[in-house]
Amino acid sequence: LGDIKYFSANVQILSSAPHYRNHNHAIFLLLLLLNLKHQKATVAKGGSFEQCIENIDIGGPSMLRSTAKNHISTTIVTAPSQYPLLQATLEKHGGTTLSIRKQFACAAFALSASYDSAIANWFSQQPLGTEEEAPKPVVTRVYNHEFPLKYGCNPHQKPASISSVGAKPLPFQILNGVPGYINLLDAVNAYQLVKELREATDLPAASSFKHVSPAGAAVAVPLTDVEKQAYEITAEKSATLTPVALAYLRARNADPMCSFGDFAAVSDIVDEPTAKILKVEVSDGIVAPGYTPEALAILKKKKGGKFIVLEATKDYVPEEREYREVYGMTFSQKRNDVLITKDHMTNVVTQNGSSDKGGMSDSAVRDMIVSSICIKYTQSNSVGFAKNGMMVGVGAGQQSRVDCVKLASKKVHTWFLRQHPKVLGLKFKEGVKRQDRVNARVRYIEGDFTPEERVRWEAQFDSVPESLSAEEKDAFMKTLEDVTLTSDAFFPFRDSIDHASKTGVKYVVQPGGSVLDGEVTKACDEYGMAMCHTGVRLFHH
């Protein structure tokens, strides 16, 4: 260490001479390659307090910082990933350049900060073993810049970037495309959703995300013949559907208007049939645990080669505590790692659905799990309706819970009325695009055209369709049954249940805990619904 300081001091004296001033082109061969003791690894292995203390490096960080400080004349190398650049520089210049030394010095100080922060965080969690008041914990976080983003949420929010935390890798790698800020927020939420669905149901799962809430989510459940018609699935195409393709097809068709330009996530390897479905949809990207070569080739060509393809990091485990910085404050909390399973559906509080009344069917429990995990990743307040292993209506981000129910119910009506014979029988002109057909069917169901809009809408058909009357809609909706309703928090009043009764709801899932739980339960009994209290609130912000 003394030699390093002595050498640096002499170089600084010599550099005052004119022929030593151009440091960027001077040749320096003094290198320090340094590894620090693995104190963090000792902690991870469950080492004793004494072992962890013993593995705190003292001399290493001192040498590292000293060499980095004196980068004008010395080169500090702290990671094998730096070797290729170092070798190339040595081969080209015969030594290191000032710009390289500055770059490596910066990395060295970052490593030192990371090393010390890990020790400080570990130390702050250790018991004092005395009666003295425990000190306030010191939290230090080290972020490693991974790649820049074009901008943040909006174009004026620059600069923007993605960083990893400490020594952990990112939860994904980019196989194709250039993801944006909101793309990645969608991706990490969507993938957690499908990962948990897969674990809880043992079925391939998929989700379709827009603006950090799911437009749809589903597991692989076979389509009915009517659903095939409504989703434009021919007999030939139906024969090729794999479980993964089926899951995404259902997720996308929960609310195909909201899924326009979605970010998709699937729980299993993406195969060719799944890629072919994505190929014809308007979508920004996908995250999955992997891709077959055929599927990846298809997806890489989508959007002129700009379609975003992310591969989830295998066996990735996020930190138990998560942090968020907002307006000069840092929020921290334990990550919401609760996994909703069938075990949460055992506390039946209504007359229907109890064990002495035959209990819940397997399909009902499956839909309860699907809707509960879906709303776990939906902006609160939120409710969700599910049927046939898929979300059929998601109501997100409303201040009033009954407004969530009304919003989601409207989506359920649209989803189910797409299966009405009149809607299935609409005759489009040749050449009308797929998404235009989707939008036209929804507007036909809604029926509230302006005069100008009606002219453009009618131009898509060979002959003007007969209107779908309110009476026809009501009659058809009365045939909808066995729908599940899930809420991310308790129902404060019975009004949500009253409204849900118009949407074929038979099963209700909620945490419980309201002072009016009794009235809500009574409402469910009046409508013949079965309701479970999970005891788990699922707010998401």
Image (cartoon, rainbow, N blue to C red):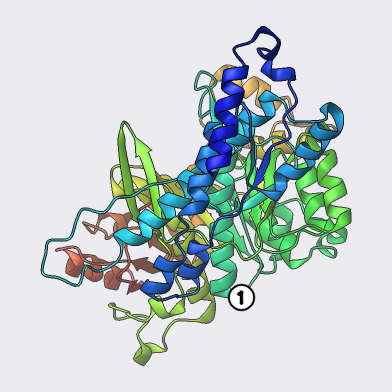
User: x and y percent of residue 417 in the render?
Assistant: 57, 50
Task: Estimate the x, y position of residue 339 in percent, counting from the top left.
Answer: 45, 69
Residue 409 in sight in this render: no
Residue in view at x 21 percent, y 57 percent: 493
Residue lying at 31% horizontally and 32% vertically, measured from the top left:
328
Residue sticking out furthest to the top: 18
Name the residue at the bottom extreme.
356
Q: Quadrant of residue 30?
A: top right
For the residue pair 434 and 473, the one nearer the viewer reads as 434
Using a 10 Å C-alpha cutoff, classify the residue at mark 1 as few (fewer than 14 neighbours), some (14 to 19) or many (20 or more). Answer: few
Which residue is identified by label 1? 202
| Residue 435 occupies quadrant | top right
Callout 1 amino acid: Asp
Of the pair 121 and 23, the residue shown nearer to us: 23
Lateral position of residue 182 relative to residue 331, left or right: right
| Residue 70 relative to residue 372: left or right | right
Q: Residue 37 placed where, x, y %? A: 53, 60
Residue 238 placement (x, y as % from top left)? 81, 62
Q: Is residue 448 above or below residue 293?
A: above
